[in-house]
Image (cartoon, rainbow, N blue to C red):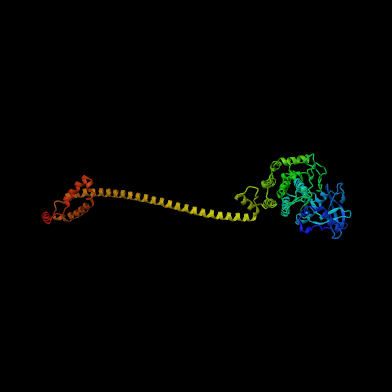
Amino acid sequence: MSQPPDPRAHPASVGNLPEGVDSTAFILERLQAHGAKHTRYAQRGELARGGMGLILRVWDEDLRRELAMKVVLGAAGQAAGDEIPPKVLGRFLEEAQVTGQLDHPGIVPVHELGLDQRGGVFFTMRLVKGRDLKEVFELVQSGGSNASGDEWTLTRVLWVLLKVCEAMAYAHSKGVIHRDLKPANVMVGRFGEVYVMDWGLARVLGQPDRHDLRLRNEGTSLSFVESERRADASHSADSVLFTMDGDVVGTPAYMAPEQARGQIDRLGPRSDVYSLGAMLYHLLTGEMPFVTPGVKVSQHMVLRWALEGPPRPVGSLRQDVPDELVAICEKAMAREPEQRYADMGALGEDLRAYLENRVVKAHKRGAWVELRKWVQRNRALAAAWSAAVFVALLGLSATAWVQVRGRRVAEEARAQAQSSERVAQDNLAEAQRQEAIARRERSNVLRLSASQELEDLTRAADGLWPAVPARVADMQAWLARAERLIAGLEPGADGDPGHRRLLEELRARALPLDPAAHAAAVA
């Protein structure tokens, strides 16, 4: 008997088994060799049921803890191993194995894969106590709080989506895409835990899908079946919350265009980026893409709308949504994969930038936007810097005012000095003019006085002649007066003919006689 291949040589997925090896049979053989393990778990009720999967609440008798157990259902909806189609069983085992290898805080850990006493396959995982994002979105739209007082805001949900980005970025780094991201597949725990759930449609990139659940029908390109997703809405085949299996797999409202076209070779991390963008669209608008609340439509119609074009713009449904979030949503939901974010890390970085008041790359950028975002992030520091700048500007303004005031005072002083100088010059000119007038007046007075004295001397001269000895003293006194008067009048006497005549007469009479003439006159 040949030995089965060693699974340790192919750790990524059961899909890594060599060609020709039945992976489902291989895993079942190993599980049967380990024996039934269901006896250690006590059932405590049903948590959720899908078309091919059942989730139970169980109690681990050995470790004394509550767990969630997922059991694969057969065609009749019973947990019976012999009734399960091989591809359904293979997909179930693939889900357990892939999820078990994704070791991340945002992905529910798988604890054990085994068989129950009837041969049914199950796996156990952490029991997440909380609510899914679909319910959280409804809380946000209704005001943010519920009866328990748990308040949900847009910002709080955006932080949850950021954690989803981080979990999916990790899965993508391991080569795994989810293919069915939607609000119902994200759980939020009571203490802030965020888990991406239900990896039943996950695909390992670069490997053939040995358990492709897409069902083809000769009469139509689509065949609708209920997957093993948790049925949290309605069991109606027309419900857009159900996962479609056929030429396409996923949920139409959150499905990337290439996924809606069934282009499996084009699926990749950017397909999950689109789905998360569709979740953001739902959060921002309160509506699933391509679905109007209260209007019942078939999956065919939603799929057709998803193929024909983008959903209604966010801005046409809600005008109060920040432009940055609209830009993030539109970029993530771009029709062509190349136009979307390159990966979940880039999408998460833009969400974080928005939450931290930094510039969102999908939105406009510039120095002013950078400054505004920096101020919003660092309000206290910005206030301190603003105060410092204000004080500096105030100081500069005061200095400039002092300088301007000083220049103004100096200019006013210079103008005052110039004015005073002009006044002084005017005063000096006026004084000089008044002095000239005074001199002329004084000269006129003196001249008039001298003219009168001149006339008096001229008349007195007639009484001194003849010059007898008795009148010598009078003659000498008259001569002294005449000489003094001549000295004072002679420079200005030319201006008056009468004065000039009197002066000549006085000069003729007053000139000293020679001694002989004087002696003769006295004798």
State the residue in front, 447 or 224: 224
Quarter of the image where the C terminus is located: bottom left
Residue 68 visible (yes or no): no
Residue found at x 63% / y 56%: 381
Residue found at x 69% / y 42%: 315
Spot the residue most to the front: 1
518 to the left or right of 257: left
Expressed as whole percent of the image width and height from the top left, the position of residue 219 reads 79, 39
Expressed as whole percent of the image width and height from the top left, the position of residue 244 reads 78, 44
State the residue in front, 5 or 280: 5
Residue 450 visible (yes or no): yes
491 to the left or right of 207: left
Q: Quadrant of residue 498?
A: top left
State the residue in front, 523 or 347: 347
State the residue in front, 344 or 24: 24
Callout count = 0
Expressed as whole percent of the image width and height from the top left, the position of residue 255 reads 74, 45
209 to the left or right of 117: left
Spot the residue most to the bottom: 62
Residue found at x 49% / y 52%: 404
Quarter of the image where the N terminus is located: bottom right
Expressed as whole percent of the image width and height from the top left, the position of residue 241 reads 78, 45
